[in-house]
Protein backbone atom coordinates (compact mmCIF):
# COMPACT_ATOMS: atom_id res chain seq x y z
CA UNK A 1 0.00 0.00 0.00
CA UNK A 2 1.35 3.41 -1.00
CA UNK A 3 1.78 5.80 1.91
CA UNK A 4 -0.10 8.95 0.90
CA UNK A 5 1.62 10.96 3.64
CA UNK A 6 4.99 10.76 1.85
CA UNK A 7 3.52 12.39 -1.25
CA UNK A 8 1.59 15.00 0.73
CA UNK A 9 4.90 16.25 2.13
CA UNK A 10 6.05 17.33 -1.34
CA UNK A 11 5.03 20.99 -1.31
CA UNK A 12 5.11 21.39 -5.12
CA UNK A 13 2.39 18.74 -5.50
CA UNK A 14 -0.95 20.30 -4.50
CA UNK A 15 -2.45 17.03 -3.31
CA UNK A 16 -4.26 18.08 -0.12
CA UNK A 17 -7.92 17.19 -0.51
CA UNK A 18 -7.21 15.12 -3.63
CA UNK A 19 -5.00 12.18 -2.74
CA UNK A 20 -7.09 11.33 0.32
CA UNK A 21 -10.07 10.72 -2.02
CA UNK A 22 -8.19 8.35 -4.36
CA UNK A 23 -8.95 4.64 -4.13
CA UNK A 24 -6.12 2.15 -4.68
CA UNK A 25 -6.69 2.00 -8.44
CA UNK A 26 -6.63 5.79 -8.90
CA UNK A 27 -3.64 6.11 -6.59
CA UNK A 28 -1.68 3.54 -8.61
CA UNK A 29 -2.52 5.44 -11.81
CA UNK A 30 -1.30 8.63 -10.17
CA UNK A 31 1.93 6.90 -9.10
CA UNK A 32 2.45 5.83 -12.72
CA UNK A 33 2.11 9.46 -13.81
CA UNK A 34 4.68 10.50 -11.22
CA UNK A 35 7.07 7.79 -12.40
CA UNK A 36 6.53 8.81 -16.01
CA UNK A 37 7.49 12.38 -15.10
CA UNK A 38 10.63 11.26 -13.24
CA UNK A 39 11.66 8.75 -15.93
CA UNK A 40 11.20 11.16 -18.85
CA UNK A 41 12.72 14.23 -17.20
CA UNK A 42 16.38 13.57 -18.18
CA UNK A 43 15.43 13.26 -21.86
CA UNK A 44 13.16 16.34 -21.70
CA UNK A 45 15.88 18.29 -19.93
CA UNK A 46 18.38 17.48 -22.72
CA UNK A 47 15.87 18.50 -25.40
CA UNK A 48 15.20 21.81 -23.64
CA UNK A 49 18.91 22.56 -23.26
CA UNK A 50 19.54 21.72 -26.93
CA UNK A 51 16.72 24.03 -28.00
CA UNK A 52 18.10 26.78 -25.75
CA UNK A 53 21.61 26.44 -27.19
CA UNK A 54 20.17 26.64 -30.70
CA UNK A 55 17.86 29.52 -29.72
CA UNK A 56 15.08 27.47 -31.34
CA UNK A 57 12.06 28.90 -29.50
CA UNK A 58 9.55 26.94 -31.54
CA UNK A 59 11.10 23.64 -30.43
CA UNK A 60 11.55 24.99 -26.91
CA UNK A 61 7.83 25.85 -26.79
CA UNK A 62 7.00 22.29 -27.87
CA UNK A 63 9.12 20.72 -25.11
CA UNK A 64 7.90 23.13 -22.44
CA UNK A 65 4.30 22.40 -23.44
CA UNK A 66 4.95 18.69 -22.93
CA UNK A 67 6.44 19.38 -19.49
CA UNK A 68 3.53 21.67 -18.59
CA UNK A 69 1.05 18.95 -19.52
CA UNK A 70 2.58 16.34 -17.23
CA UNK A 71 2.98 18.90 -14.42
CA UNK A 72 -0.74 19.62 -14.66
CA UNK A 73 -1.56 15.92 -14.47
CA UNK A 74 0.49 15.38 -11.31
CA UNK A 75 -1.00 18.50 -9.65
CA UNK A 76 2.24 20.51 -9.68
CA UNK A 77 -0.04 23.48 -10.31
CA UNK A 78 2.26 26.40 -9.54
CA UNK A 79 5.09 24.95 -11.61
CA UNK A 80 2.68 24.34 -14.50
CA UNK A 81 1.53 27.96 -14.27
CA UNK A 82 5.15 29.18 -14.26
CA UNK A 83 5.78 27.03 -17.32
CA UNK A 84 2.79 28.59 -19.10
CA UNK A 85 4.07 32.10 -18.36
CA UNK A 86 7.46 31.16 -19.76
CA UNK A 87 5.89 29.80 -22.96
CA UNK A 88 3.78 32.96 -23.40
CA UNK A 89 6.73 35.35 -23.34
CA UNK A 90 9.35 33.28 -25.17
CA UNK A 91 9.19 35.51 -28.22
CA UNK A 92 9.29 38.80 -26.32
CA UNK A 93 12.13 38.39 -23.82
CA UNK A 94 15.90 38.56 -24.25
CA UNK A 95 17.65 35.24 -24.65
CA UNK A 96 19.75 35.86 -21.52
CA UNK A 97 16.62 36.14 -19.39
CA UNK A 98 15.05 33.05 -20.97
CA UNK A 99 18.26 31.13 -20.37
CA UNK A 100 18.46 32.23 -16.73
CA UNK A 101 14.86 31.26 -16.07
CA UNK A 102 15.29 27.87 -17.72
CA UNK A 103 18.29 27.05 -15.51
CA UNK A 104 16.18 27.81 -12.47
CA UNK A 105 13.16 25.94 -13.85
CA UNK A 106 15.16 22.82 -14.76
CA UNK A 107 16.73 22.86 -11.31
CA UNK A 108 13.25 22.97 -9.75
CA UNK A 109 12.10 20.08 -11.94
CA UNK A 110 15.11 18.00 -10.89
CA UNK A 111 14.38 18.64 -7.21
CA UNK A 112 10.73 17.65 -7.70
CA UNK A 113 11.78 14.46 -9.49
CA UNK A 114 14.19 13.57 -6.67
CA UNK A 115 11.52 14.22 -4.02
CA UNK A 116 9.04 11.98 -5.87
CA UNK A 117 11.53 9.14 -6.11
CA UNK A 118 12.54 9.54 -2.48
CA UNK A 119 8.91 9.47 -1.32
CA UNK A 120 8.31 6.15 -3.07
CA UNK A 121 11.59 4.66 -1.92
CA UNK A 122 10.65 5.39 1.68
CA UNK A 123 7.26 3.73 1.10
CA UNK A 124 8.78 0.58 -0.36
CA UNK A 125 11.22 0.16 2.48
CA UNK A 126 8.78 0.91 5.29
CA UNK A 127 7.50 -2.68 5.47
CA UNK A 128 10.96 -4.10 6.16
CA UNK A 129 11.60 -4.74 9.86
CA UNK A 130 15.30 -3.98 9.67
CA UNK A 131 14.57 -0.70 7.96
CA UNK A 132 12.05 0.18 10.64
CA UNK A 133 14.64 -0.38 13.35
CA UNK A 134 17.20 1.73 11.52
CA UNK A 135 14.57 4.36 10.88
CA UNK A 136 13.71 4.41 14.59
CA UNK A 137 17.35 5.15 15.43
CA UNK A 138 17.44 7.88 12.81
CA UNK A 139 14.20 9.27 14.20
CA UNK A 140 15.63 9.45 17.73
CA UNK A 141 18.74 11.19 16.45
CA UNK A 142 16.61 13.59 14.43
CA UNK A 143 14.44 14.38 17.46
CA UNK A 144 17.55 15.16 19.52
CA UNK A 145 18.75 17.56 16.84
CA UNK A 146 15.34 19.22 16.67
CA UNK A 147 15.23 19.55 20.47
CA UNK A 148 18.68 21.21 20.47
CA UNK A 149 17.60 23.63 17.75
CA UNK A 150 14.38 24.49 19.58
CA UNK A 151 16.36 25.25 22.72
CA UNK A 152 18.26 27.89 20.72
CA UNK A 153 15.02 29.80 20.00
CA UNK A 154 15.05 32.46 22.70
CA UNK A 155 11.32 33.17 22.44
CA UNK A 156 10.51 29.60 23.51
CA UNK A 157 11.03 29.24 27.25
CA UNK A 158 11.58 25.47 27.18
CA UNK A 159 14.89 25.08 29.02
CA UNK A 160 14.26 22.53 31.79
CA UNK A 161 11.00 21.46 30.14
CA UNK A 162 11.90 19.88 26.82
CA UNK A 163 14.67 17.79 28.39
CA UNK A 164 12.08 16.16 30.67
CA UNK A 165 9.59 15.33 27.93
CA UNK A 166 8.94 11.69 27.09
CA UNK A 167 8.73 10.72 23.42
CA UNK A 168 4.94 11.06 23.20
CA UNK A 169 5.05 14.38 25.08
CA UNK A 170 7.75 15.69 22.73
CA UNK A 171 5.70 14.61 19.69
CA UNK A 172 2.65 16.38 21.11
CA UNK A 173 4.73 19.50 21.62
CA UNK A 174 5.95 19.35 18.02
CA UNK A 175 2.32 19.08 16.91
CA UNK A 176 1.52 22.25 18.88
CA UNK A 177 4.44 24.03 17.23
CA UNK A 178 3.24 22.89 13.81
CA UNK A 179 -0.27 24.07 14.65
CA UNK A 180 1.14 27.50 15.41
CA UNK A 181 3.11 27.70 12.13
CA UNK A 182 0.13 26.36 10.15
CA UNK A 183 -2.45 28.80 11.50
CA UNK A 184 -0.22 31.86 11.80
CA UNK A 185 -0.54 33.11 8.18
CA UNK A 186 -4.34 32.99 8.46
CA UNK A 187 -4.33 34.65 11.88
CA UNK A 188 -1.97 37.33 10.56
CA UNK A 189 -4.42 38.17 7.77
CA UNK A 190 -7.34 38.29 10.21
CA UNK A 191 -5.43 40.64 12.52
CA UNK A 192 -4.50 42.91 9.61
CA UNK A 193 -8.12 42.99 8.42
CA UNK A 194 -9.35 43.87 11.92
CA UNK A 195 -6.75 46.64 12.13
CA UNK A 196 -7.78 48.01 8.75
CA UNK A 197 -11.43 48.02 9.80
CA UNK A 198 -10.51 49.42 13.24
CA UNK A 199 -12.60 46.58 14.69
CA UNK A 200 -11.33 46.26 18.27
CA UNK A 201 -13.70 43.38 19.11
CA UNK A 202 -12.43 41.26 16.22
CA UNK A 203 -8.84 42.24 17.00
CA UNK A 204 -9.30 41.17 20.63
CA UNK A 205 -10.72 37.81 19.52
CA UNK A 206 -7.85 37.07 17.12
CA UNK A 207 -5.20 38.18 19.60
CA UNK A 208 -6.79 35.95 22.25
CA UNK A 209 -6.49 32.97 19.88
CA UNK A 210 -2.82 33.80 19.27
CA UNK A 211 -2.18 34.28 22.99
CA UNK A 212 -3.65 30.84 23.69
CA UNK A 213 -1.34 28.99 21.29
CA UNK A 214 1.68 31.03 22.40
CA UNK A 215 1.07 29.89 25.98
CA UNK A 216 0.80 26.26 24.88
CA UNK A 217 4.15 26.35 23.07
CA UNK A 218 5.87 28.11 26.03
CA UNK A 219 6.39 31.43 24.23
CA UNK A 220 5.69 32.94 27.63
CA UNK A 221 6.95 36.50 27.20
CA UNK A 222 5.18 36.91 23.86
CA UNK A 223 1.98 35.53 25.37
CA UNK A 224 2.26 38.04 28.23
CA UNK A 225 2.85 40.91 25.80
CA UNK A 226 -0.19 39.76 23.86
CA UNK A 227 -2.29 39.74 27.02
CA UNK A 228 -1.18 43.27 27.91
CA UNK A 229 -2.12 44.46 24.44
CA UNK A 230 -5.55 42.83 24.67
CA UNK A 231 -6.21 44.48 28.04
CA UNK A 232 -5.20 47.92 26.76
CA UNK A 233 -6.98 47.92 23.38
CA UNK A 234 -10.00 49.87 24.58
CA UNK A 235 -7.88 52.57 26.25
CA UNK A 236 -5.07 52.97 23.68
CA UNK A 237 -5.03 55.19 20.62
CA UNK A 238 -5.42 53.38 17.30
CA UNK A 239 -2.06 54.70 16.07
CA UNK A 240 -0.29 53.11 19.05
CA UNK A 241 -2.17 49.82 18.59
CA UNK A 242 -1.25 49.77 14.91
CA UNK A 243 2.43 50.44 15.63
CA UNK A 244 2.56 47.68 18.22
CA UNK A 245 0.83 45.18 15.93
CA UNK A 246 3.36 45.77 13.15
CA UNK A 247 6.12 44.91 15.59
CA UNK A 248 4.21 42.00 17.13
CA UNK A 249 3.34 40.38 13.78
CA UNK A 250 6.95 40.70 12.67
CA UNK A 251 8.05 38.96 15.87
CA UNK A 252 5.50 36.19 15.37
CA UNK A 253 6.67 35.69 11.78
CA UNK A 254 10.26 35.30 12.93
CA UNK A 255 9.21 32.80 15.60
CA UNK A 256 7.25 30.81 13.01
CA UNK A 257 10.27 30.71 10.69
CA UNK A 258 12.66 29.72 13.49
CA UNK A 259 10.35 26.85 14.49
CA UNK A 260 10.10 25.64 10.90
CA UNK A 261 13.86 25.87 10.39
CA UNK A 262 14.46 23.87 13.57
CA UNK A 263 12.51 20.99 12.07
CA UNK A 264 14.00 21.17 8.57
CA UNK A 265 16.39 18.44 7.46
CA UNK A 266 19.13 20.96 6.80
CA UNK A 267 22.61 20.78 8.26
CA UNK A 268 23.37 24.43 8.97
CA UNK A 269 26.65 23.45 10.63
CA UNK A 270 27.94 22.55 7.17
CA UNK A 271 27.94 26.23 6.21
CA UNK A 272 29.18 27.65 9.52
CA UNK A 273 32.94 28.18 9.22
CA UNK A 274 35.39 27.23 11.91
CA UNK A 275 36.14 30.02 14.33
CA UNK A 276 38.61 32.45 12.77
CA UNK A 277 41.00 34.92 14.32
CA UNK A 278 39.86 38.52 14.62
CA UNK A 279 41.98 39.74 11.71
CA UNK A 280 40.27 37.40 9.25
CA UNK A 281 36.86 38.07 10.75
CA UNK A 282 37.33 41.80 10.22
CA UNK A 283 37.50 41.12 6.47
CA UNK A 284 34.13 39.31 6.35
CA UNK A 285 32.19 40.47 3.29
CA UNK A 286 28.40 40.63 3.03
CA UNK A 287 26.53 41.02 -0.26
CA UNK A 288 22.99 42.38 0.16
CA UNK A 289 20.57 42.29 -2.78
CA UNK A 290 17.24 44.15 -2.58
CA UNK A 291 15.41 46.22 -5.19
CA UNK A 292 14.12 48.56 -2.44
CA UNK A 293 16.61 51.29 -1.52
CA UNK A 294 14.89 51.76 1.85
CA UNK A 295 15.83 48.29 3.10
CA UNK A 296 19.39 48.59 1.81
CA UNK A 297 19.70 51.87 3.72
CA UNK A 298 18.51 50.16 6.89
CA UNK A 299 21.11 47.42 6.43
CA UNK A 300 23.84 50.02 5.96
CA UNK A 301 22.83 51.86 9.13
CA UNK A 302 22.70 48.68 11.20
CA UNK A 303 26.07 47.40 10.00
CA UNK A 304 27.97 50.69 9.73
CA UNK A 305 29.53 50.33 13.18
CA UNK A 306 30.36 46.61 12.83
CA UNK A 307 33.44 44.85 11.47
CA UNK A 308 31.60 43.59 8.41
CA UNK A 309 32.16 44.96 4.90
CA UNK A 310 28.75 45.41 3.31
CA UNK A 311 28.15 45.71 -0.43
CA UNK A 312 24.62 46.54 -1.60
CA UNK A 313 23.17 46.01 -5.10
CA UNK A 314 19.60 46.41 -6.30
CA UNK A 315 19.19 43.53 -8.77
CA UNK A 316 20.14 39.92 -9.42
CA UNK A 317 22.02 40.92 -12.54
CA UNK A 318 24.20 43.38 -10.60
CA UNK A 319 24.81 40.71 -7.97
CA UNK A 320 26.07 38.22 -10.57
CA UNK A 321 28.37 40.86 -12.07
CA UNK A 322 29.80 41.51 -8.60
CA UNK A 323 30.41 37.79 -8.11
CA UNK A 324 32.59 37.65 -11.21
CA UNK A 325 35.32 39.44 -9.26
CA UNK A 326 34.46 38.86 -5.61
CA UNK A 327 33.52 36.08 -3.20
CA UNK A 328 31.31 37.20 -0.26
CA UNK A 329 31.27 35.39 3.06
CA UNK A 330 27.49 35.64 3.31
CA UNK A 331 24.51 36.65 1.16
CA UNK A 332 21.42 38.63 2.24
CA UNK A 333 18.84 38.25 -0.54
CA UNK A 334 15.40 39.73 -0.95
CA UNK A 335 12.98 37.20 -2.48
CA UNK A 336 10.47 39.34 -4.32
CA UNK A 337 12.42 41.31 -6.93
CA UNK A 338 11.51 42.18 -10.53
CA UNK A 339 13.32 40.43 -13.36
CA UNK A 340 15.37 37.91 -11.39
CA UNK A 341 13.78 37.04 -8.04
CA UNK A 342 15.64 35.74 -5.00
CA UNK A 343 14.91 32.09 -5.80
CA UNK A 344 16.48 32.34 -9.24
CA UNK A 345 19.40 34.40 -7.96
CA UNK A 346 20.13 31.84 -5.21
CA UNK A 347 20.15 29.05 -7.80
CA UNK A 348 22.51 31.07 -10.02
CA UNK A 349 24.79 31.76 -7.05
CA UNK A 350 25.05 28.03 -6.30
CA UNK A 351 25.65 27.24 -9.98
CA UNK A 352 28.53 29.72 -10.04
CA UNK A 353 30.36 27.74 -7.36
CA UNK A 354 29.76 30.19 -4.51
CA UNK A 355 29.22 28.28 -1.24
CA UNK A 356 28.68 31.12 1.24
CA UNK A 357 25.49 30.94 3.38
CA UNK A 358 22.37 32.49 1.86
CA UNK A 359 19.94 34.28 4.19
CA UNK A 360 16.68 35.42 2.65
CA UNK A 361 14.95 38.67 3.60
CA UNK A 362 11.22 38.06 3.55
CA UNK A 363 7.85 39.13 4.89
CA UNK A 364 6.25 35.72 4.40
CA UNK A 365 6.33 32.85 6.91
CA UNK A 366 4.23 30.31 4.93
CA UNK A 367 5.64 26.79 4.83
CA UNK A 368 5.45 26.50 1.04
CA UNK A 369 7.37 29.77 0.70
CA UNK A 370 10.15 28.64 3.01
CA UNK A 371 10.37 25.15 1.51
CA UNK A 372 10.96 26.63 -1.94
CA UNK A 373 13.66 28.94 -0.58
CA UNK A 374 15.43 26.12 1.24
CA UNK A 375 15.51 24.02 -1.92
CA UNK A 376 17.43 26.72 -3.77
CA UNK A 377 20.01 27.10 -1.02
CA UNK A 378 18.68 29.17 1.91
CA UNK A 379 20.06 28.36 5.34
CA UNK A 380 18.11 31.02 7.25
CA UNK A 381 15.62 33.88 7.03
CA UNK A 382 15.15 37.40 8.38
CA UNK A 383 11.68 38.93 8.53
CA UNK A 384 10.99 42.41 7.22
CA UNK A 385 10.84 45.01 8.69
CA UNK A 386 14.40 44.26 9.74
CA UNK A 387 15.13 44.03 13.47
CA UNK A 388 18.69 45.01 14.36
CA UNK A 389 19.21 42.34 17.03
CA UNK A 390 17.79 39.59 14.81
CA UNK A 391 19.92 40.66 11.84
CA UNK A 392 23.14 40.78 13.85
CA UNK A 393 22.34 37.51 15.57
CA UNK A 394 21.77 35.69 12.27
CA UNK A 395 24.94 37.12 10.73
CA UNK A 396 27.07 36.21 13.76
CA UNK A 397 25.79 32.64 13.54
CA UNK A 398 27.38 32.22 10.11
CA UNK A 399 30.35 34.61 10.41
CA UNK A 400 31.85 33.72 13.71
Image (tube, rainbow, N blue to C red):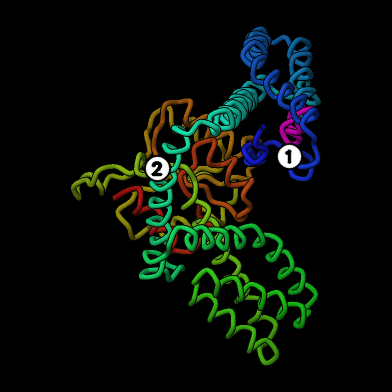
Query: Does the stretch in magenta take in 76?
Result: yes
Q: What kind of secondary structure does the magenta stretch mostly adopt?
A: helix
How far from the left and from the top, in percent, is residue 38? Answer: 64, 20
> Mark 1 and mark 2: span between their CA atoms?
31 Å
Q: What residue sits right under mark 2 in the picture?
A: 137
Q: Nearer the viewer, residue 54 or 124?
A: 124
> Tag count in the figure?
2
Q: Which of the 4 image quadrants contains residue 87?
A: top right
Query: Does the stretch in magenta take in 286?
Result: no
How far from the left and from the top, in percent, is residue 315? Answer: 57, 39
Q: Residue furthest front?
A: 129
How far from the left and from the top, in percent, is residue 181? Answer: 60, 59
- What span is colored magenta in the figure? 72-84
* Label 1: element kind: loop
When the figure is inspected, residue 48 is found, relative to residue 351, above or below; the finding is above
Local crowd size for mark 1, using a 10 Å CA cut-off: few (<14), some (14–19), many (≥20): some
**Of label 1 and label 2, which has the lower sequence position?**
1
How far from the left and from the top, in percent, is residue 107? Answer: 58, 26
Q: Nearer the viewer, residue 19 or 222?
A: 19
The quarter of the image holding the N terminus is top right
User: Residue shown at 74%/39% (left/top)?
Assistant: 15
Which label was assigned to residue 14? Answer: 1
Q: Which of the 4 image quadrants contains residue 40?
A: top right
* Label 2: element kind: helix
Local crowd size for mark 2, using a 10 Å CA cut-off: few (<14), some (14–19), many (≥20): few
User: Residue shown at 79%/28% (left/top)?
Assistant: 25
Residue 301 is at least partly visible in this image: no
Which label was assigned to residue 29? Answer: none
When the figure is inspected, residue 379 is found, relative to residue 297, above or below; the finding is above
User: Residue shown at 61%/67% (left/top)?
Assistant: 249
When the figure is inspected, residue 241 is found, relative to residue 46, above or below; the finding is below
Q: Nearer the viewer, residue 1 or 107?
A: 1
Amino acid sequence: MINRENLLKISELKLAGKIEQMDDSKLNNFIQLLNSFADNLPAQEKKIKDALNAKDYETLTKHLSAVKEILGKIYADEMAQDCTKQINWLGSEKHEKIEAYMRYFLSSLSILSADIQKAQKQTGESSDTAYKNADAETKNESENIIAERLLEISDLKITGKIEQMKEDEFNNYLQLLNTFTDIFPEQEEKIKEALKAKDNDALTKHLTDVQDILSKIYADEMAQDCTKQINSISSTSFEKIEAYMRYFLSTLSMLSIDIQMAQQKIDTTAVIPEKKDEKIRSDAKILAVDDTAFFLTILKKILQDTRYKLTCVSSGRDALKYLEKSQPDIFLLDIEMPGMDGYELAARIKESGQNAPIIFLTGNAKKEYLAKAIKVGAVDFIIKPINKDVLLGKIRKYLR
